[in-house]
Amino acid sequence: METILVATDFSDSANNAVDYAIELAKYFDSKIILVNAYPMPYSSFETGGMPGDMIGVMQEASIGGLQNLKKKIEQEHKHNFDIECFSDMGFAEDVVVDVAKKVDTDLIVMGIVGDGEKSKTHLIGSTAIKVARNTSTPVFIIPNGTKYHPIKKISFACNLNKTEEGDLIYVSRYFGKAFDAELEVINVEEPDEEFSLEKSKTSNVIEKKIKAVPHKSVFITQKNVGKALEDYFNEHPTDVVIVNPRKHNLFHNLFSHSVSKELAFQCNYPLLCIH
């Protein structure tokens, strides 16, 4: 894990994600890339086009904020960090994805941010989720208030109906080894759902691929995926939940309006989105 990119808008939730990323960087001895995006100023025919002086002010504030954050990290942590700062104008999700490609980052860390309190009940609209869906780089999404602690258990929420999970398990296994953690593979089934031949094959493939690391497989029966996982984690706490934001409907079910607050904000588990 050579390079960790952490996006910030200097909000409380972003600062919390920065703190989490710093601990990850210490653990892996990684380089840190700080990224901030500032919006394009409003322009109209009445104002005569783009207010160039406003762009300069916003750019200066962005760069200054990043430099202050870099200095704060260096002063508060006894670690020889290698830190770079990137500032650019545009939508935050586009800037983060572009910088991630440019610096060939290994991991993106973001807080759950959005329109204030609205993001707490409608997580699907947050910048972090958009980034997770539009990059091939693993994305750590850190709920506000969740603090870093040693990662000893990683839970991979998957769907055995999807054969691609057999490939995603490689990424899950990598993180299990990287953190020296137990890997837990969780499949949520609907009531009366049959254990198909495809599920059996996928389960066997997964078992073979993770046999070299400490692991266990769990099967949960419940129609509401998010509620099923929430109930399970209340009884069996974890340190990180791995999900796949693009391949199938599990991610969409997990982050539907009805379950986003319960899972992401009450359980307070970091979400690691992989592809």
Image (tube, grey):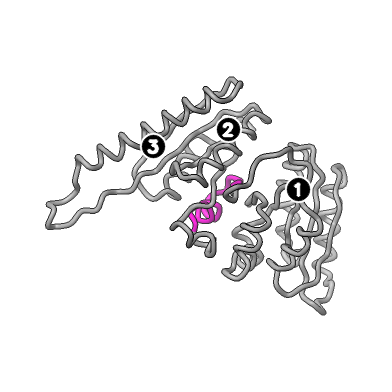
Looking at numbered disc 3 in the image, what kind of residue is underneath it? Answer: Ser
The residue labelled by disc 3 is: 87
Residue 246, placed above or below residue 269: below
Instruction: Please indicate whether residue 15 sits to the left or right of residue 87 in the image.
Output: right
Neighbour class for label 1 at 10 Å: few (<14), some, many (≥20)?
many
How far, Cα to Cα, is label 3 from label 2? 17 Å
Is 131 one of the magenta-colored residues? yes
Q: What's the amino acid at mark 1?
A: Ile
Q: Does the residue at mark 1 contact the one at mark 2 (Cβ under 8 Å)?
A: no
User: Which quadrant of the structure image shows residue 27?
Assistant: top right
Mark 3: few, some, or many residues within 10 Å (few <14, many ≥20)? many
Q: Label 2 neighbourhood size at 10 Å, few (<14), some (14-19), many (20+)?
A: many
What percent of the width, then of the height, locates residue 128? Answer: 52, 52
Q: Position of residue 179 (x, y in %)?
A: 75, 37
Magenta includes 200? Answer: no
Residue under the image location 30 percent in, 34 percent down: 60
Q: Is residue 128 above or below residue 227?
A: above
Disc on res. 154 = 1
Q: In which image quadrant can residue 120 be found? A: bottom right
Q: Residue at x 20, y 42 (%)?
A: 52
User: For this rendering, which residue is in front, 133 or 188?
Assistant: 188
Instruction: Please give left or right for residue 175 compared with residue 63 in the image.
Output: right
Residue 3 has which mark? Answer: 2
- Tell me the CA gap for discs 1 and 3: 33 Å
Task: Specify the segment rendered in magenta.
Answer: 126-140
122 vs 23, left or right, is: left
Frontmost residue, 249 versus 196 = 249
Do the residues bearing badges 3 and 2 touch, measured as CB atoms within 8 Å? no
Q: How far apart are labels 1 and 2 at the CA level?
A: 21 Å
Q: Tell me: residue 102, above or below residue 135.
A: above
